[in-house]
């Protein structure tokens, strides 16, 4: 069995700790995929030093040339797409077509960000004084720390690595402990593509040890974190004056109005609620349905859910893969119990599957009210709750009744409902007549309220997250000019 190492300063090295941890296949927990370095704070400091040395030469490379390295990454990802996708399914559990989507997202974001190498726009604007030129340019931030979750083990690191690199930063990257192998395979590709030594450093290990040192280390100038609200709050409290980007949880709703195409809505709910076994930040965990069609929707959903087949994500017959680990199974079960105790009606599922692997039956609750915990808290498992609303205003009120604000969706054929939802739902994303999932890399991604702190990833948002805007004034008047004080007179 292979023991994988950290990547620091362009070398694959063991941790100071001499300790390792394992990564397993969540569908077959006895199947070990490899061992990984249980790194220490000292390892992080060594990586920060390497990133510091690499920063100046890397940031000095003109962005269009940095882009060539990103294009190489894209090409290598394309070449290795199938291999990486299968490995991703093995380590994270999602079904193979979704794993291919995960890798494709990485391909897309490296391509998009490579293109930004020829843009990286600043802007120009007139000065209030004569013979003075005003503009902004984009500069890198310095050493940036990336901390990622396990649910998109290739795509999310890529969403951060590609903009960080094109902007000229150097990186210290810590992946989730459940998916270190995907991270290592991605970094191997970066190495092969020509990312210079030290520009990207990978450290595996726990959040408490490695993650917290990244967050607190004074030489790291920015943190980009994707994960739970709880750890997001810890980041905010401990990062000092660093620039911080947070992408946290969701409790996303699909509204289904009485004028909707019901079949389309059912497909969207199944895809949004049970795709990736409900383990997406954008998963549709709430369905807010118009009273008139509630019964009809429940019947249609039940029929579809009963046809979903659980199994290993590599099997072509599988619709729903495993949960990531045992504690995710226990958490999902805990919420089933809470839902029943709160008085919600369990329509189907709610069971741990008695087979090897972290499987849980797709679960549907109805008669859920907005104050119930299953309607408010992120479960991150295959559990969907149906709430009933009497009109569009109440549906939007229910959609907004949670602390999170990531994704949302409405199924309707009435343009007035669609526009009300687009304007009034408190979320970073609203889809009309499609599910809560399906972001594209050239558009900004992120949430409002407790889902984050206002930053956006992907698209131009990614460039803003990983660069500083610098303002330049060029005075060619050859005299002392004072903004706000000198009075500009009309020439006669
Ligand atoms: P998590 O918060 O437990 O872990 C995320 C990362 O933080 C991991 O690498 C982990 O090791 C690290 N970490 C844990 N404790 C830490 C600490 N004290 N200091 C520093 N780092 C620490 O989240 P998770 O279980 O890996 O992922 C699931 C969560 O991520 C869900 O809440 C989901 O909604 C969210 N998520 C959000 C988005 C988004 O873009 N908004 C995308 C995917 C997942």
Image (spheres, helix red, strand yellow):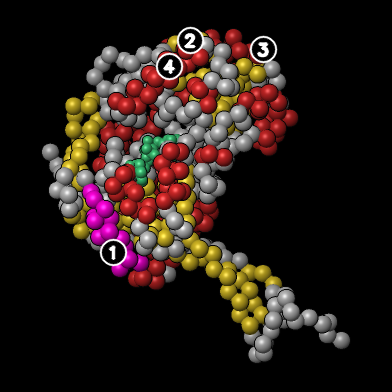
* Residue count near mark 1 (Cα–Cα under 10 Å), binned few <14, some 14–19, many ≥20: some
The magenta stretch spans residue 40: yes
Label 3: which secondary element:
helix
Q: Residue at point 26% right, 45% down?
A: 205
Which of pointers 1 and 2 lies earlier in the amino acid sequence? 1
Q: CA distance from mark 2 to mark 3?
A: 19 Å
Give the dominant element type of the magenta stretch: helix, strand or loop. Answer: helix
Q: CA distance from mark 1 to mark 4?
A: 47 Å
Q: Nearer the viewer, residue 110 or 466?
A: 466
Q: CA distance from mark 1 to mark 2?
A: 56 Å
Q: Which residue position holds label 4?
A: 336
Label 2: which secondary element:
strand
Q: Are marks 2 and 4 in contact (CB under 8 Å)?
A: no
Q: Are marks 3 and 1 in contact (CB under 8 Å)?
A: no
Classify 195 as above or below 303.
below
Check residue 409 in the rendering and tell me which mark sits there, or answer none. none
Asked if residue 84 shows in the view, the reply is no
Quarter residue 10 falls in: bottom left
Q: Which residue position holds label 1?
A: 49
* Residue count near mark 2 (Cα–Cα under 10 Å), binned few <14, some 14–19, many ≥20: some
* Between marks 1 and 2 in the image, the one whose residue lies nearer the viewer: 1
Q: Which residue position holds label 3?
A: 292
Q: Are marks 4 and 3 in contact (CB under 8 Å)?
A: no
**As drawn, is 41 to the left or to the right of 114?**
left
Which of pointers 2 and 3 lies earlier in the amino acid sequence? 3
* Residue count near mark 3 (Cα–Cα under 10 Å), binned few <14, some 14–19, many ≥20: some
Residue 119 placement (x, y as % from top left): 52, 62
Q: Which residue position holds label 2?
A: 347
């Amino acid at each position: 069995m292979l023991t994988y190492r950290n990547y620091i300063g362009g070398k694959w090295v063991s941790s100071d700790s001499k300790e390792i941890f394992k990564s397993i296949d969540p569908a077959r927990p006895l199947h070990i995929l490899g061992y990984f370095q249980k790194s220490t704070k000292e390892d992080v400091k060594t990586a920060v030093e390497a990133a510091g040395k690499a920063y100046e030469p890397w940031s000095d490379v003109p962005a269009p040339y940095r882009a060539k390295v990103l294009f190489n990454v894209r090409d290598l990802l394309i070449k290795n797409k199938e291999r990486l996708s299968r490995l991703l399914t093995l380590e994270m559990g999602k079904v193979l077509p979704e794993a291919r989507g995960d890798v494709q997202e990485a391909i897309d974001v490296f391509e998009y960000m490579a293109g930004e190498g020829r843009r990286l726009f600043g802007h120009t604007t007139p000065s209030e004084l004569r013979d003075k030129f005003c503009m902004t340019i984009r500069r890198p931030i310095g050493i940036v720390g990336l901390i990622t979750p396990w649910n998109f083990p290739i795509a999310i690191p890529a969403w951060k690595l590609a903009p960080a690199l094109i902007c000229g930063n150097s990186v210290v990257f810590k992946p989730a402990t459940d998916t270190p192998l995907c991270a290592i395979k991605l970094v191997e590709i970066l190495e092969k593509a020509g990312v210079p030594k030290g520009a990207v450093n990978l450290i595996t290990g726990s959040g408490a040890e490695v993650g917290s040192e990244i967050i607190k280390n004074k030489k790291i100038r920015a943190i980009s974190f994707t994960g739970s609200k709880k750890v997001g709050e810890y980041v905010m409290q401990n990062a000092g004056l660093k620039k911080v980007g947070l992408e946290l949880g969701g409790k996303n709703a699909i509204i289904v109005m009485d004028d909707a195409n019901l079949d389309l809505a059912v497909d969207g709910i199944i895809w949004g609620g049970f795709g990736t076994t409900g383990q997406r930040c954008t998963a549709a965990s709430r369905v807010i349905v118009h009273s008139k069609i509630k019964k009809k929707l429940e019947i249609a959903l039940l029929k579809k859910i009963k046809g979903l087949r659980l199994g290993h994500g590599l099997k072509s017959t599988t619709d729903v893969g495993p949960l990531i680990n045992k504690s995710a199974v226990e958490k999902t079960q805990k919420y089933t119990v809470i839902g029943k105790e709160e008085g919600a009606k369990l329509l189907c599922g709610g069971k741990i599957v008695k087979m090897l692997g972290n499987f849980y039956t797709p679960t549907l609750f109805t008669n859920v009210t907005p104050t119930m915990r299953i309607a408010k808290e992120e479960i991150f498992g295959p559990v969907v709750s149906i709430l009933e609303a009497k009109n569009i205003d109440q549906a939007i009120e229910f959609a907004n009744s949670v602390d999170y604000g990531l994704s949302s969706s409405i199924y309707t054929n009435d343009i007035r409902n669609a526009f009300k939802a687009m304007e009034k739902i408190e979320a970073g994303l609203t889809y009309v007549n499609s599910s809560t999932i399906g972001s594209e890399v050239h558009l900004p991604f992120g949430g409002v309220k407790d889902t984050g702190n206002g930053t956006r990833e992907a698209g131009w948002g990614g460039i803003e997250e990983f660069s500083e805007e610098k303002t330049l004034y060029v005075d060619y008047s050859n005299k002392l000019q004072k903004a706000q004080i000198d009075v500009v007179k009309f020439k006669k």
